[in-house]
Amino acid sequence: MDTLAHLGTALAFELTHPLGLFLILAGVTIGFIFGATPGLTATMGVALFIPLTFPLSGDLAVGMMIALYCGSMAGGAIPAILINIPGTPSAIITTLDGYPMARQGQAARAYGWALVASVVGGLISWLALVSIAPLLARLALKLGPAEYAATAFLGMTIIASIVPGRVVKGLLCAILGIGLSIVGLDQITGEGRWTFGTLDLMRGIDIMPALIGLLVIPELMSSLFGPPAHAKAPDSLKGMLPSFREWREQAVNNIRSALIGVGIGIVPALGGSIGSLIAYDQARRFDKDGARYGKGAPGGVVASEAANNGVTGGALIPLLTLGIPGDTVTAMLLGGLMIHGLQPGPRLFETSADVVWAILASALLANIAIILVGLIGFRFFVRVLDVPRHLLAPALFVLAVVGTYSLANQWFDVLVMLVLGVAGFLLTLGNFPVYPIVIGVILGPLLESEMRRALVISGGDWSTFIHRPISAVILALALVALILPTVLAQGRNLRGRLRARGQANNPVAVENRE
Amino acid sequence: MSLLRLGASVIVLVGLLGLCALLAGPAFELPAAAYGSGLGAGAFPQFVVVAVAVLACLLLVQDLRQWRRPAAPGAQQPDGDEFSGGPGRVLLLGSGVFLLLAAFVFAWPWLGFLPVAIAFMAVLALLLAPRSARSARSVAITLLTSVLFCSGLWALFVHVLAVPLR
């Protein structure tokens, strides 16, 4: 009942404020543009538009950013369907059936299915967000410093080990992130750490310049090496949206895929593309027309789009309740929240309840706005694909520089962004996952302060992390997260080697099979 | 692993080892233990320096072994190469863009934001333009877009968001 009352008040407030509604529509539209343009991502969109929200209050600003996030997830389907290039990484599965549908003259139909599935997926993920987040926040309030430190450690290990075959690189990057977060004055003793006597370094490395340098600059650089994209909108948009009867046939697929997306979104670092892949696989198994998947089945588009929009609400759950961002976009949102004076974590629901509920109400309206913006703006979003890359990329570089400077009016922040941008690009080239650095920068201070606090309380007894049951379980999970991917990868490699040896020993059988 | 990825990986790892050597002194000057609390201001910096150095050495050995030996059949391959155009183009274009960006950042405090931003955007756009977009008309459009975009951005930040972009 409490939830409904809070939500009702927040929704009434949002609906009676034209500026709030305008910002949600603007956020979804900008999101569609970033999603529909291959090479531009939701992370980039949120990062570049955060500085433009300075004059706004926290709820309006973060509401707009969430709208941008939701819009970009839905917009990614446009190039995926029309030109077989996913606008966002999470739309890659949409190409499997969306593009074949377009080649069969059903581009508008595929887009209609994508829109409906996105909205339903977004609404289900929003429902999960408003039902789970307040409960989890209340539970998290009961955790002590040892459990917090263990949770931060778990977040880092999951993210460091999630990339198959790159666990050591992920771990190295997460520790590098902790290293970046250390620079500045020690939170407890006030001693300078790696400051080299300079005032700028004593201030520490702010999160946003680090995030823009590590995430946006390498993404912008990578976009320079992608192929140019041109598309043509379908001649007729008649019959674009499926009827209710048609949707009912896909309802189970739509809801199941959205729930898969929510689940994947809650686990840090898995992200929309994995959610879409799992949902697509499940949809193909359960659909009686499973054999048609990959050849232009609407069910494939529905599964992919419902799941990647389902991820949005799921990823916001650990962000708002524990202060752990689920993906790169929510890492940017965390920066945005902090710039507006909001500290994500369990206390957020107590200290800034009005703002949180207003943000959640904005998320609902953003998901509804997707269908409106997606229908009206479709032809315009297709034209966005024709904007010359050689003009777009330099403009975004300028925006990244100005945006970074405007965070604190400090030229030093721009320098940090530049240095970390070069480092981020080199790391990307060297096949290092950059996201663990980001999570290290964000969770490093939490891990250190809570660990030190727990040790002060226990009188320096390290066994406090194991004797407290919740902390012990979380640490055990962290250990499993760290070891399991390596064990699985070793198992796959061993199976591959055994198969290769078997083929080498029995070449006749291989020839016959061929 | 492609030569580009291997080269970048080795550069990163050697750079990290250099960074560890630079940061080890200041890290070990700080106390790792504090009275009554177990952890001092130096504990995390010391952990970071040692852990990064150990992991970087491990990865460096792994990289060099991978370079000398072809990958085992059936072994997991790294992600596909998303950088089209070959290592030469990536190095040339990548370093060119970063040099221009660095020139933008360092010239800004001396020459002022607007002229430097317009010059950066125009030069980078001309550098990135495909051959088909290098006619006099296209160059004029590029210059005009740079002037309009940067001026608009400057006006937005200075007059609406009250950010002093000098």
Image (cartoon, coloured by chain):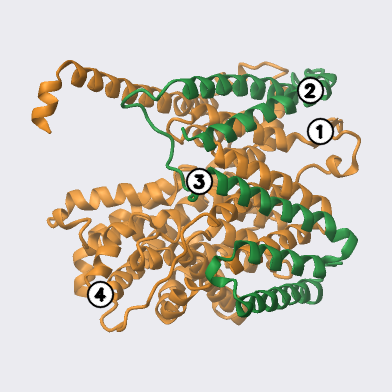
Q: Secondary structure at mark 4?
A: loop
Q: Indicate the position of residue A429 as horizontal and vertical percent values.
A: 56, 41
Q: Secondary structure at mark 1?
A: loop
Residue A465 circle label: none
Disc 1: CA contacts within 10 A as few (<14), some (14-19) or many (>=20): some
Mark 4 on the same chain as mark 2 = no
Badge 2 sits on which subunit? Answer: B
Q: Indicate the position of residue B45 as horizontal and vertical percent values.
A: 74, 26
Q: Is residue B92 visible?
A: yes
Disc 2: CA contacts within 10 A as few (<14), some (14-19) or many (>=20): some
Residue for badge 4: A242
Q: Marks 2 and 3, Cα distance to the nearest angstrom?
A: 48 Å
Please name which of the two marks, 3 or 4, marks the residue nearer to the observer.
3
**Rendered shade, chain A:** orange
Q: Which chain is green?
A: B
Residue for badge 1: A186
Q: Considering only vertical position in the picture, is B89 above or below A231?
A: above
Give the residue type that dot 1 points to: Asp
Residue for badge 2: B40
Displayed quadrant of residue A438: top right
Labels 1 and 3 touching (C-beta < 8 A)? no
* Sooner in the amino-acid sequence: mark 4 or mark 1: 1
Front one among A409 and A427: A427
Q: Marks 1 and 3, Cα distance to the nearest angstrom?
A: 45 Å
Q: Is residue A50 visible?
A: no
Q: Marks 3 and 4, Cα distance to the nearest angstrom?
A: 44 Å
Residue for badge 3: B86
Front one among A356 and A214: A214
